[in-house]
Image (cartoon, rainbow, N blue to C red):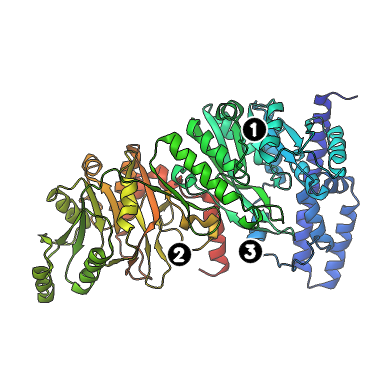
Amino acid sequence: MMDRDELERRLAIRTAELEAAHHRIEELLEKVNALKSSKTKLSAAKQERDTLRDSPEYRLGRKLVLPFRKLARAITGKKAERAPGVPEARPDAYHHWFLSQRASGASLAAMRAAAQGMKPLISIVMPTYNTPLAMLEEAVSSVRAQAYPHWELVIADDASDNATVPARLRSLAEEEPRIRLKFLERNHGIALASNAAMAMAQGDFVGLLDHDDWLEPDALYEAARLIEADPETDLVYTDEDKIDANGLFQQPFFKPDWSPDMLLSTNYLCHFTVIRRTLLEKAGGFREGFDGAQDYDLFLRATEAARAIQHVPRILYHWRVSAHSTAGATQQKPAAIPSGLTALRQALERRGIEGEVSQAGQGARYRVRRTIAEAKKITIIIPARDRVELVQRCVESITTRTDYPNYEIVIADNGSTDPATRRYYETLGRRILPYPGPFNYSAINNFAVRETDAPWILFLNNDTEVINADWLSSMAEHIQRPEVGAVGARLLYPDGTVQHAGVILTEKATAIHPYCHARAKSSENGGSLQMVRNYSAVTAACMLTRRDVFEQAGGFDEMQLAVAYNDVDYCLKLRRAGLAIVYTPFAQLYHYESASRGRGRSDPAEGRILRARWPETVARDPFGNETLARYEASRNAENGK
């Protein structure tokens, strides 16, 4: 019998051959698509395809690697199997875009070569129970196809009563020495079955794989690369999508880097997650009684003790939509929501946070409503110049719709001349701070801060209107946290679409508002609009901050960022000081800024100043996602934008 090294050597050779065949298949598929209008040329292409299909490399690919088998089905015209009653779906834009973004054969070959000098052993833990054999084989094949060779697949079968499952598991283990099995004598549930598999794990790190899902071939390499780069890395997670019954990729979830507030809103880490084994042991592994949210409960506990948490911004995990998975709908596992609520409540108790936990909207989205320990005075600063109808609407919405008990309104007037404005000020009964001279947003607000004394300060544009009564309370609950420097709100256009839900920096557009013009309750990209989360910046059209951190940061830049990007620059200064920026969707206001204007009136020089001042964040905003940016660019190109 061959030893493991010889098996790995032969497997590497066959894998390289398989990759070459994969490239030939892709080239042929492109040729067929390009020439399908010509019967003569199409026939020649099909003949070349048939020749290729008879090659040993191609036959090996059908046995080992699911993606290659799916490409083969696409070439031969065979339709993917569909579940009974599921209508045939058409390939969508994301599906084709994703296929174009996968790691190439050359890239995977380079990864294999680089991985030879890497050390971490990654144990893939996979509990099984009556798994459909086709899905089981696809999951296992996706592990065997990994470019990173230092892995073991530890499978705990949770007493499947379908005898074909343990039988197939045994045959798979005979084919692959890196597969290790444990058969439980009775059904324990996914949490304890996963623990049984983890108890057998020998790796330095543990990756979590569901029995009916599958990995991209570069998943383990990308995780191992980050682990090697930073020895303190305790947890790595990747982006993910879903795969439907027709084999179509859909619903991509492009995640931000580590966002602790987002994790308190939902299990955004989810798939694919790799955790240091010693951290798992310290956290206590999975806990019984959290059915449907056992991963969420584990991640909440593990991240509390993790030193460094890394993110791979690539779609490397495919979550199957099936009748037994929460990928399709939360109703598939009704216990998931109450289990998630329990996990969150216990997390607050462990962390000493007073507050309430509730479901936010539909699905596994949660709201942690923190108790406000002391309702400190908030000065609401509203810069204005004439346009009395805007100021009046803004002020009246505050005074009639705000449940926060301790605030004052201060208007910083920048040279109003309209008599109607002056008459309104005289009857308003609020403090008016005259600021003469040319418009300088930074200087006006800095001046107003100096003329007031409240410990908390809210910067608010005069063209806003409060929507919900707890808007200010929803922001105050976060600004009281010592680790938070600024809090932003959700701003909507009058038609109810999003104007602002955080700020992301890019090299091309400097500072953009993600999800601009999206529906406020959109579920796109994991429903990120509906969650409290962290960003690099929020807009000062509605921003709450503390006086002490504002003064320590030097306020807004009056000299170089007089009109635009001063709020972004301020937030980045806070982040440099170690403070978090929080966006909450539970503070909602209308913003009557022109829907077509955006930041178009800003001086391009100010954008250049911001980019030069913060080059690292502009090059890679940790709360953006470069893969999402590429996807959106491709969609815009297709739409002619």
Q: Tag 1 or tag 3, which sits nearer the N-term? A: 3
Mark 3 packing: few (<14 Cα in 10 Å), some, or many (20+)?
some
Q: Residue at x 17, y 50 (%)?
A: 449
Query: What residue would you read off at disc 3?
Result: 93
Toward the viewer: 619 or 337? 337
Alpha-carbon span between mark 3 and mark 1: 34 Å
Foreground: 107 or 201?
A: 201
Residue 213: percent from left, percent from top: 71, 47
Q: Helix, strand or loop at disc 3? A: helix
Check disc 1 and give the amino acid type. Answer: Val
**Residue placed under numbered mark 2 in the picture:** 520
Residue 147 seen in the figure: no
Q: Is residue 439 left or right of residue 84?
A: left
* Residue topped by disc 1: 206
Q: Is residue 416 above or below residue 557?
A: below
Query: Which tag, 3 or 2, sits closer to the chain's start?
Result: 3
Q: CA distance from mark 1 to mark 2?
A: 37 Å
Residue 72, image x, y percentages: 82, 55
